[in-house]
Image (spheres, rainbow, N blue to C red):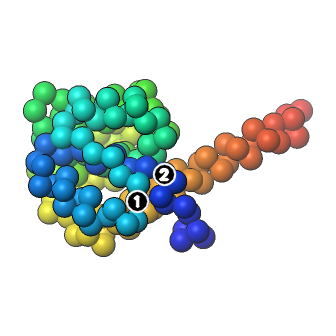
Amino acid sequence: MIESVPYKNYPVLFVDDEEMAVVTFQRLFKNDFTIYTALNGEQAIEVLEAHPEIALIATDQRMPKVSGLELLIHVAEKYPAIINILITAYSDMALIIKAVNCGNLYRYIAKPYEEPFLKRTIMDGLNRYHQFNERELFFAKYKGFFTA
């Protein structure tokens, strides 16, 4: 069932202040996913506003002005259905706990990431997003049937 998810229909936003990381991500995954990118948190918010169809965000933690955690908290508040992934080279347990509790964190990935692992994680996240949307559509369609 997972392989039947139309991954290209669910855009991914990748955020990292290192341009080479963004270029690498695009090169690795452009054939698998529809990708939007941003080089900082402020740009990411602009991209999200311009593209409400974004289903998953993968963001670096340490960025100038708006950190990955701050971005994920914003996304969790304004776009609660989006799947959130935090990618960082720094393992700060307090930060991870806050990301889970306040940023609706789906997965935490350590840098440097392994391409197959990140790809599978994104696919799993998009599958979760797809299933949620299908369930919501189902209940909307049969709303009268399930109410007393």
Residue shown at the point (56%, 63%) measured from the top left: 5
- The part of the image, by quadrant, that contains residue 137 is top right
Q: Nearer the viewer, residue 63 or 49?
A: 49
Residue drawn 87% across the image and 35% down it: 144
Coordinates of residue 31 in the picture (x, y in percent): 37, 66
Residue 76 in sight from this viewpoint: no
Contact between marks 1 and 2 (CB within 8 A): the answer is yes
Q: Quadrant of the C terminus?
A: top right
Q: Nearer the viewer, residue 46 or 83?
A: 46
Residue drawn at the location 11% of the way across and 55% of the way down: 20
Q: Residues within 10 Å of mark 1 (few under 14, many from 20)?
A: many
Q: Is residue 129 left or right of residue 103?
A: right
Residue that label 2 marks: 10
Relative vertical location of residue 102 with respect to residue 14 in this rendering, above or below: above
124 sits to left or right of 95:
right
Q: CA distance from mark 1 to mark 2?
A: 8 Å
Q: Position of residue 121 (x, y in %)?
A: 37, 62
**The residue tagged with tag 1: helix, strand or loop?**
loop
Mark 2 element type: loop
Among numbered discs 1 and 2, the one appearing first in the sequence:
2
Please give left or right for residue 128 compared with residue 72 in the image: right
